[in-house]
């Protein structure tokens, strides 16, 4: 399993902290230069976001564009190697070397068509919609397909070759945010799994992408919703509650 660290070249201090947290992992880690979306010229930025807008999705922020391009590069580097799996990390991830060893052990048991989200779900409002099953009460959770769209962040995941190929193919058609897991894997043979091994900082003040997402979300919330939108949203919430009840009856539990 190859380990890739996605990090902006200028963020040497973050990599120093990463090296202190993971001293045994560091020598085996490949640093991939992340793309700073804020430094894209206007033509390049609009080329990437236009396709997203054309398909009815929201406007991607510069940081989101950079994040997506960075993870495409990481997956392409993985596919160019001989490794069966890749562990992709971002430089603010929290954990230690024992956690990485635990994930390496889990990777040995993954099928080629699996992708394992290695944690980082702290503080997300949609975490209450993440449901999974465990084999004999052992890690990791096998997520319900319903929950794929409620998985977020790309700070830590183990990916096999079919999943990497699927992500790249989807992104090449029209760029999406890097953590649009539901769009990548819903209605496919690829399974999503979750192990709450690594963590993401709950203080998001130093995260550019999180700050831009909050700003854009607040901007959207200022718009007055029509009666049709409110009725549609209420119907959607009712349908979601029914699906969750069905999952509970099928033995799925909150993947905490």
Image (cartoon, rainbow, N blue to C red):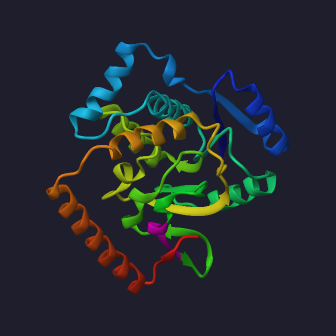
Answer left or right for 173 relative to 119. Answer: left
In the image, is residue 87 above or below residue 128?
above
Q: Which one is nearer the viewer's eye here, 48 or 226?
A: 226
Whether residue 225 appears in this view of the structure is yes
Residue at x 61% of width, y 80% of height: 137
Residue 108 magenta: no
Residue 222 location, x and y as percent?
Answer: 33, 44
The mark tally for this picture is 0
In the image, is residue 55 above or below residue 51?
below
Residue at x 49% of width, y 52% of height: 152
Residue 131 magenta: yes
Q: Which one is nearer the viewer's eye here, 134 or 198?
A: 198
Residue 58 location, x and y as percent?
Answer: 31, 39
Residue 60 location, x and y as percent?
Answer: 38, 34
Answer left or right for 236 relative to 36. Answer: left
Residue at x 59% of width, y 70% of height: 256
Residue 241 location, x and y as percent?
Answer: 33, 75
Residue lying farthest to the bottom in this orientation: 249
Location of residue 30 by image quarter: top right
Location of residue 135 by image quarter: bottom right
In the image, is residue 67 above or below residue 94?
above
């Amino acid at each position: 399993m190859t380990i890739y660290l996605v990090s902006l070249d200028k963020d040497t201090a973050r990599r120093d902290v990463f090296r202190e947290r993971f001293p045994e992992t560091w020598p085996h880690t490949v640093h991939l230069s992340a793309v700073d979306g804020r430094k894209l010229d206007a033509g390049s930025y609009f080329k990437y976001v236009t396709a997203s807008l054309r398909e009815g999705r929201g406007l991607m922020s510069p940081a989101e564009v950079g994040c997506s391009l960075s993870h495409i590069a990481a997956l392409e580097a993985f596919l160019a190697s001989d490794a069966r799996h890749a562990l992709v990390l971002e430089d603010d991830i929290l954990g230690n070397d024992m956690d990485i060893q635990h994930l390496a052990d889990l990777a040995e048991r993954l099928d080629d068509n699996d992708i394992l989200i290695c944690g980082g779900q702290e503080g997300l409002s949609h975490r209450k919609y993440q449901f999974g099953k465990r084999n004999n009460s052992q890690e990791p959770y096998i997520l319900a397909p319903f929950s794929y769209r409620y998985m977020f962040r790309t700070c830590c995941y183990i990916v096999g070759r079919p999943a990497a190929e699927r992500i790249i193919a989807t992104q090449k058609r029209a760029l999406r945010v890097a953590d649009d897991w539901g769009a990548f894997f819903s209605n496919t043979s690829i399974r999503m799994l979750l192990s709450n091994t690594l963590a993401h900082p709950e203080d998001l003040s130093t995260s550019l992408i999180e700050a831009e997402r909050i700003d854009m979300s607040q901007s959207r919330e200022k718009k007055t919703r029509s009666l049709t939108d409110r009725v549609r949203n209420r119907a959607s919430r009712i349908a979601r509650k029914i699906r969750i009840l069905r999952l509970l009856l099928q033995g799925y539990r909150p993947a905490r």
